[in-house]
Image (spheres, rainbow, N blue to C red):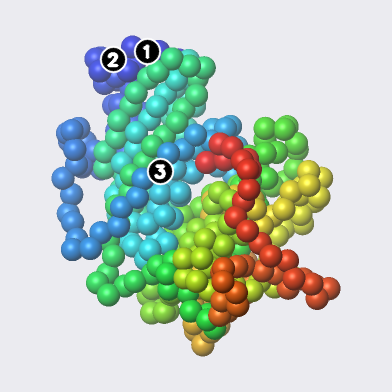
Amino acid sequence: MIITMAHGSGGAFTSELIDKIFVKEFDNETVKELEDCAVIPGSKKIAMTTDSFVVKPIEYPGGDIGRLCICGTVNDLLMRGAKAKYITCGFIIEEGANSETLKRIVHSMAETAKEAGVIIVAGDTKVIDGNGGIMINTAGVGFVEEGLDISSRNLTPGDLVILSGNLGDHHATILGSRMNITNSIKSDNAPLTDIVSNLLKEKINIHTMRDVTRGGLATVLTELSRSSRVDIKLEEDKIPVSNAVRDFCGLLGLDPLYMGNEGKCIIVVPKNEAGKALEVIRNSKYGENAVIIGEVKEMAEDKACVYIETEIGGKRILDVLQDEGLPRIC
């Protein structure tokens, strides 16, 4: 079945689309009510986020826009220590989209939501003129335990910085797909629920977490250093990049420090808890390649900065990503 403007009319075709694709996959009592809004159990302290996903291509090695939108939304909640609970999704479907593609994407969303431990409770569809594309907007809600304060403002000199795994996989996958480059690289898009829940369960004193998405590691750490007014020193030889991604970067002149990821995060903890935190992360799903990559330092000059001590003894100052980078990566 090809999606037409009639599927966005609000009539019989819209009902068919909702019943046969969305309700079938997002199978829970709240969605089945088909109300204008979801009424769900709450909490004293909640986390909320919203995001939009326009990645091209919409299906790629290791994932698709459906998996991506759940991972991105869940991970944003997790980075503040929230237990992700509910997600809404709005589909913008261009006329000409194939319903079989839509079914695969919705199924992928449902499976990823189960893996992440969240429920998709509400949604919307709009069909617009176009060339068969699909875009998704999400909103996510999570619950935060009283007294928990994980924030970009909490970096403290002496803290150690842990990276949960290899850099650059998602960026290389999307760019490789667009350029028809054949390789073994697959997107890292993944919900980081297990890593965060295990750290909280073990009562690790997490000062800061941030998922390493657009702009890459250099941008994320620079933003954090400025927020907390501290310096961050990285060790070049400790930053994990797979051989396949390193070769890909060499071919195209890319820097893994500025490449986007969709299943990696940095966790900043006090030095005396870093060893235990690293062990917990490595024993969690998607954290097997975690490594300590740097240390938080006192701000040495008027402006906080991130820098690398290179293997040959030099010093490289990092900054946020300049210019556009790779558009439509998520």
- The residue where tag 1 is placed is 5
213 shown above or below 270: above
Q: Secondary structure at mark 3?
A: strand
Disc 1 to disc 2, C-alpha distance = 7 Å
Disc 1 to disc 3, C-alpha distance = 25 Å
Disc 3 residue type (three-letter): Asp
Left or right: 72 in relation to 178:
left
Q: Position of residue 173 (x, y in %)?
A: 65, 43
Specify the farthest residue to the front.
302
What residue sits 40% from the left and 43% below the top?
51
The foreground one among 325 and 291 is 325
- The residue where tag 3 is placed is 51
The foreground one among 133 and 111 is 133
- Contact between labelled residues 2 and 3, with CB atoms less than 8 Å apart: no
- Contact between labelled residues 2 and 1, with CB atoms less than 8 Å apart: yes
Left or right: 120 in relation to 103:
left
Disc 1 residue type (three-letter): Met
Dot 3 crowding, Cα within 10 Å, few <14, some 14–19, many 20+: some
Disc 2 residue type (three-letter): Ser
Quadrant into which the N terminus falls: top left
The foreground one among 304 and 220 is 304
Q: Secondary structure at mark 2?
A: loop
Disc 3 to disc 2, C-alpha distance = 25 Å
Foreground tag (1 vs 3): 3
- The residue where tag 2 is placed is 9
Foreground tag (3 vs 2): 3
What residue sits 30% from the left and 52% below the top?
48
